[in-house]
Amino acid sequence: MMPMPSTQYTRREGLHIGYQVWGDGELDILDLGFGTYISIDEATEQIRWRRYSERLASCGRLIRFDPIGIGLSDAPDSLDQLTYDNWVRDAVAVLDAVGSTRAVVLAASSSALAALLFASHHPDRTESLVLINATARYVEDDDYSIGVPAALMREFQAGLDPDRPDEVSEDLNDLRLFAPSGVGDPEFEQWWSRASRRGAAPATAAVLSELTAGADFRDLLSGISRPTLVIHRQDARAPSLAHGQYVAERIPRARLVTLPGNDVTPFTGDLDEILDEIQEFVTGDRYQAEPERVLATILFTDIVESTAAAASLGDRNWNRVLAEYNSLMDNRLQRFGGQLVKDTGDGSLATFDSPSRAIRCASAVREGALHLGIQMRAGLHAGEIERRGADVGGIAVHLAARVAGAADSGEVLVTGTIVDLVEGSGIEFSDRGSSPLKGVPGPRRLWAVVTA
């Protein structure tokens, strides 16, 4: 987990602006927020927001601040100073303070209004623009039928007044609108309520809400010249997908990506889908998750001289024997708790949680194969494997395959790691000595299972 950055301050016209810098990459990412009045300082208490921040910081130096009137920053002498123009001035002051001349400008929901203004007024300082669930105008108009009905906007604004808590329907609750995946999660609900109250006093929240409701930056869209990514969740309610489509259609060469979900805040819902798109856009590289590594016992089995047996029996009889062998393998795996990874044609690869059960499974398959008139051999090793979807990989898998290849007909061969792990199990081994294995550094001591 990335260390929580300390809060620093810069000044603009005598007002302190609190900001934080996450990470130290060469690319600067200026995050203008996600449309709420929650302070940047609250990221420490919300694991989803923190993970969102850490992944953004893996792409570059993430610069985040509270505009005047919000959270860590000073409140202005007059609420009239709460404007989008001043929000952009705050952003410029913070960029200057951290020595950034050019940044990817990122914003979600109503904060995208500030991002549009920044990109329009400061194209020289805008590397690119990333807008998430964005709009250039919230409220409906004669030429903007996709906007939120004015009556609904007024009802929502009434719900921000602590003296009028019952004047808004449950459907217009801010949590249900902006982060519906958090509804029903008591811890998240408590954090959202607490953080929202801390971020802005009621009078400030009312002014900022009116500022959002009255903003109309549609005329800026055609003049934005920087590369732009517009991401919108398909079932977001305010703003709806139509808003994102409107923005993307009118910014020259903007790219629209629609994703499933109804959360407006980017760090709720499936945040990795959004972050994957952002990372690819700003860095050119698609995010690749580290493969899951787990400790397992790996079993490889192989039918000895299967080609000769098939030629001797003929296709029909060989297919019958092979089907019976596969059924035998499935039965023994189920009995001993093994997981079939893949069928290799005349053999199989399986994993187990227990090395002793893996040995007993291999021995049982060997005995069953004799009744079918065929011989098999098996190799086992224990170590860390990488899970790659339904497949597995890693040096431990490679080593187990080589052990199987070194086994004689009818033999279950294991590494010394297996012998050490099953000590006291009653399984007996015969020392086969050290043998070189192709592709494996140095000789390995191998042991044949005598009784299991």
Image: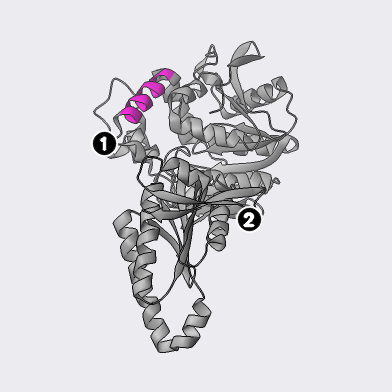
Q: Residue at x 59, y 44 (%)?
A: 278
**Looking at the image, can residue 407 be seen?**
yes
Q: Residue at x 58, y 58 (%)?
A: 402
**Is 157 situated above or below 385?**
above
Q: Main secondary structure of the magenta part?
A: helix
Q: Provide the residue span drawn in magenta.
A: 187-198
Of residues 195 and 390, the one drawn nearer to the viewer in this rendering = 390
Q: Residue at x 40, y 38 (%)?
A: 178
**Residue for badge 1:** 170
Q: Residue at x 68, y 42 (%)?
A: 128
The image shows a total of numbered marks equal to 2
In the displayed structure image, the side of residue 135 where residue 177 appears, left or right: left
Of residues 363 and 333, the one drawn nearer to the viewer in this rendering = 363
**Looking at the image, can residue 133 be seen?**
no
SS at circle 2: loop
Of residues 430 and 236, the one drawn nearer to the viewer in this rendering = 430
Residue 437 has which mark?
2
x and y percent of residue 347 in the render? 47, 68
In the displayed structure image, the side of residue 353 where residue 219 appears, left or right: right
Distance from the alpha carbon under mark 2 to that under mark 1 = 68 Å
